[in-house]
Image (cartoon, rainbow, N blue to C red):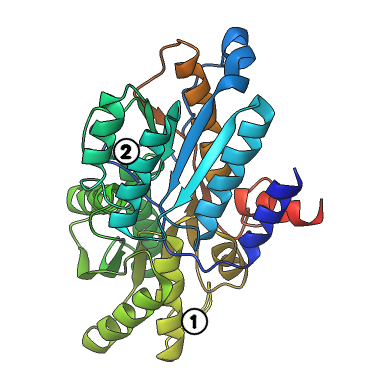
Amino acid sequence: MKKVLLIALAIAMVVSLAACNQTTPAQSSEAPASQEASQAPASESAAAASEEFTIGFSQSTLTNAFFVGMRIGVLDEAEAKGVKVVEVNANGDIATQTSQMEDLISQGVDAIISNPIDSDAIVPSEQKAVDAKIPVIYCDRGSSSGNYTSFIATDNVAMGAIAADKIAEFLTEKYGEPKGNVVEIQGLMGTSAAKDRGQGFNDQIAAKYPDITIVASQAGDFNQETSLNVMTNILQANPDIDAVYGHNDDCTLGAAKAIEAAGKMKLTGEDGHIYIIGIDGIMDALNAIKDGKIDVTIAQDPVGMGANAVDLAVQVLGGETVEKNVKQPFKVLDASNCMDETNWAIAAAAQMGS
């Protein structure tokens, strides 16, 4: 466990960049604010055989608290199951990830867990794994192909719809009805999460809130600095902003910094406050909510997601059938519950002192 505890130290050191998924079958935009993961427990026979398994773990990046949390989940669960893990990190480069995936295949790993950088670019590597009869389990991000074994992710469309509803609630409190000017800071184009989170948000606004105007929608690439620059430019062209929706917490943290630099930062509850909502539940976002600079984050569970991916791999390698698309729980965090010790970012950070 010493190795894993050291990994957890990275939670406090990394600069968050992104977190994201594959296109999944159409979901209702009226989804509830939390969902249960559908996962069957691994059988005793699969668990007993797990010590013989080697799983390749292809990571898109580790310059991100979310993916560091996912890594903790993978390594902790692999240790508990007696599974060997071969890790590779693409550092955000598509060509590197493709090469690393193919290297894992040539090494003869038994299964591959991956969160791809690009949903389309990963498909050729996925096909090579399928041809080699190596099951591929996508974690958080997925591929545009349907040849993978299983895809575990949060319902990004539903989270986008919830973000629209939360903004509508704020605008109704402000104006007496859901109307106003909203900015959308998109994620990394090419990822399924950016597509789905945008789709859920925009579809919900169009269907339920015709008087809410999305005055700008630009890519922040799941990156705080990029989002800061994008929001700075948006504020110059659109000085009257009521709310901001970011596809992840780094999008919203960057936007909040731009708002503050422009002299427009009013804390939650103050007149002129710009409502800000993001997705993921990273520690920096929780602190910003506590400080009143951001209002909501829709928190995923990357630690649980990583552990679930290992469990699914063990089940498949043990001869069991698993679900094609598995949903991981999520929950809405605001000032009332952002510092709850059960939140994944707090729980992961707490490992530093254990």
The structure residue drawn at horizontal position 74% and vertical position 51%, both measured from the top left corner, is: 351
The percent position of residue 218, horizontal first and vertical second, equals 23, 70
The structure residue drawn at horizontal position 27% and vertical position 51%, both measured from the top left corner, is: 118
The percent position of residue 88, horizontal first and vertical second, equals 47, 49
Q: Which residue is mark 1?
A: 266
The structure residue drawn at horizontal position 41% and vertical position 12%, both measured from the top left corner, is: 321
- Residue type (three-letter) at the residue carrying disc 1: Lys
Compared with residue 303, is residue 245 higher up or lower down, i.e. above or below? Answer: below
- Please give the label number shown on residue 54: none
Q: Which residue is mark 2?
A: 30
* Quarter of the picture holding the N terminus: top right
- Residue type (three-letter) at the residue carrying disc 2: Glu
Q: Is residue 203 left or right of residue 186?
A: left
Compared with residue 28, is residue 317 higher up or lower down, i.e. above or below? Answer: above
Q: Secondary structure at mark 1?
A: loop
Q: What's the CA distance linking mark 2 and mark 1?
A: 31 Å
Q: Earlier in the sequence, mark 2 or mark 1?
A: 2
The percent position of residue 157, horizontal first and vertical second, equals 30, 43
* Residue 262 in view of the camera: yes
Q: Is residue 176 left or right of residue 65?
A: left
Return the residue nearer the eye: 54 or 9.
54
Compared with residue 238, is residue 196 higher up or lower down, i.e. above or below? Answer: above
Q: Secondary structure at mark 2?
A: loop
Return the residue nearer the eye: 63 or 250.
63
